[in-house]
Every structure is written in structure tokens, then in C-alpha cells.
Image: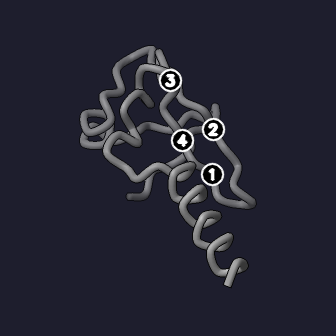
């Protein structure tokens, strides 16, 4: 989606994207430079709450590492 930069450096975010991401007047966004690519990232009011449960149901990396270590010990014993 192309948008134009105003004389004052303003960018208008299209209504469809504002609605999709819940951006309302006064909402804060970060402008991030990813090595030549600019990205607008909505600032989360409560990042801890937003991330809560994000990995729910995923396999435990710690358990996987412990199991792999057990299997290595068994191989070394042989």
C-alpha cells in the first residue's frame, strides 16, 4: 500500500490498516529502521499482558534439552 509523505513529514495510515491494528487518534507507534526498511510498530500498552500465554501449549525447550542430554549419556555409556 503506497502512501505519500507530506511536506511536514507526516504519513497517513490508511483506514483499513488503522482498523485492522486497532489504531485510534493519539495511538503511539514506534518507527523502526531494519537496515533500510522502515516499519511502524504499534506500542503495546501492557507488553507483559500482551505476551502472556503466547507460548502456551508449546513444547518445553528445557524438557527437550534435558531429554536430549539423557539420550547422549545413554549413548556415551555404550
Q: CA distance from mark 3 to mark 4?
A: 16 Å
Specify the quadrant that holds the C terminus. Answer: bottom right
The answer to the question of whether label 1 and label 3 lie on touching residues, with beta carbons closer than 8 A, is no
The answer to the question of whether label 3 and label 2 lie on touching residues, with beta carbons closer than 8 A, is no
Q: CA distance from mark 4 to mark 1?
A: 7 Å
The answer to the question of whether label 4 and label 2 lie on touching residues, with beta carbons closer than 8 A, is yes
Disc with the residue nearer the chain's start (3 vs 2): 2
Q: Which mark is residue 31?
A: 2
Tell which of 68 and 38 is nearer to you. 68
Q: CA distance from mark 3 to mark 2?
A: 17 Å
Q: Position of residue 2 (x, y in %)?
A: 43, 57
Q: Which residue is mark 4?
A: 40
Q: Nearer the viewer, mark 1 or mark 3?
A: 3
Q: Position of residue 9 (x, y in %)?
A: 63, 36
Residue 11 located left or right of residue 78: left
Tell which of 12 and 56 is nearer to you. 56
Q: Nearer the viewer, mark 3 or mark 4?
A: 3
The answer to the question of whether label 4 and label 1 lie on touching residues, with beta carbons closer than 8 A, is yes
Q: Which residue is mark 1?
A: 38
Pointer 4: residues within 10 angstroms few (<14), some, or many (20+)?
few
Residue 78 located left or right of residue 68: right
Specify the quadrant that holds the N terminus. Answer: bottom left
Above/below status of 76 relative to 60? below
Residue 73 located left or right of residue 54: right
- Which residue ends up furthest to the front in the rendered image? 78
Disc with the residue nearer the chain's start (3 vs 4): 4
Q: Position of residue 77 (x, y in %)?
A: 70, 78
- Total numbered labels: 4
Q: Which residue is mark 3?
A: 47
- Which residue ends up furthest to the bottom in the rendered image? 78
Residue at image location 42% in from the left, 20% down from the top = 49
Amino acid at each position: 500500500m503506497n502512501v505519500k509523505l507530506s511536506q511536514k513529514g507526516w504519513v497517513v495510515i490508511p483506514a483499513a490498516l488503522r482498523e485492522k491494528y486497532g489504531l485510534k487518534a493519539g495511538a503511539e507507534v514506534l518507527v523502526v529502521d531494519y537496515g533500510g526498511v522502515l516499519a511502524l510498530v504499534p506500542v503495546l500498552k501492557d507488553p507483559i499482558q500482551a505476551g502472556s500465554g503466547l507460548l502456551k501449549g508449546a513444547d518445553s525447550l528445557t524438557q527437550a534439552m534435558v531429554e536430549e542430554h539423557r539420550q547422549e549419556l545413554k549413548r556415551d555409556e555404550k
